[in-house]
Amino acid sequence: VDWDRTMAFRHHLWRLGFRIAEAMDTSQRGMGFDWRSARELIRRSIAEARTVADADLASGAGTDHLAPASARTLDDVIAAYEEQFAFIEGQGGKAIMMASRALAAVAKGPDDYALVYDRILGQASGKVILHWLGDMFDPALKGYWGSDDFETALDTVVAIIERHAG
C-alpha cells in the first residue's frame, strides 16, 4: 500500500466535503485485505482526520480476522467484534458495524443476532452505523438477521436499532 498517496487521497476527499467510510469494501475485507492491513489503514486515516477541520471518518468493525469455520459460539463472534471496536475507538475513531460471516455461520435465528448486536452496541462509546449489503454481495451472508425473508429480517434489525437509538 502506498500510504502517502492513500492519505493524500483522503485529504482530497475531505476538501471536497466527502465523509469517508474507511476499511469497508467487502471485496477487500475478508478477501485479501486482512485485519492487520485494515488496522494500519484505520490508524493512519484516523490520525490524518485529526489534522483536517470538519473531517468526517468512520471505520469498519467486523469479525474478518475470525474465520467463519473457526467460530464455534456467539461468544467467539462477540470477542472478534469487541477486538475491532476496541481498536477503532481506542484510536479515537467512530465504528461502522459490518455484517459478519462468522455470525451468519453460528447464529440459529433472530435472537442470536439480537444478542450479539445488543452486546456490541451496548458497549460502544458512541453512535454506530450498521452496515449490511445482503447476500447478493456476499452469499455467506444468506439468512442474515435470522431469516431469508426480507420483512422478517427487517423486523429484527429495526428492533435492534430502536433499542439503541438515542
Image (cartoon, rainbow, N blue to C red):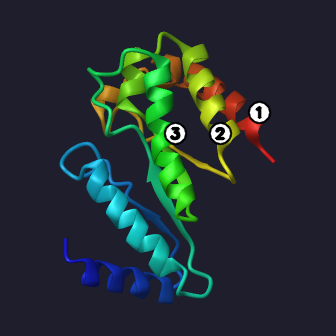
**Position of residue 40 in the picture relative to residue 79 (left or right):** left
Q: Which is nearer the N-term, disc 1 or disc 2? A: 2
Q: Which is nearer the N-term, disc 3 or disc 1? A: 3
Location of mark 3 (residue): 82
Label 1 crowd (10 A; few <14 / some 14-19 / many >=20):
few
Identify the residue shown where x is 62% and y is 82%.
Answer: 54
In this view, which residue lies farthest toward the top? 108
Q: Dividing the image into 4 quarters, which one contains the N terminus?
A: bottom left
Cα–Cα span, label 3 and label 2: 10 Å
Of 122 and 146, nearer the camera is 122
Q: Amino acid at mark 2?
A: Leu
Name the disc covering residue 163, or none.
1
Q: Position of residue 76 (x, y in %)?
A: 43, 24
Location of mark 2 (residue): 121
Label 2 crowd (10 A; few <14 / some 14-19 / many >=20):
many
Q: Are marks 1 and 2 in contact (CB under 8 Å)?
A: yes
Cα–Cα span, label 1 and label 2: 10 Å
Say if 29 sits above or below 159 in the image: below
Say if 7 sits above or below 99 in the image: below
Q: Which is nearer the N-term, disc 3 or disc 2? A: 3
SS for tag 1? helix
SS for tag 2? helix
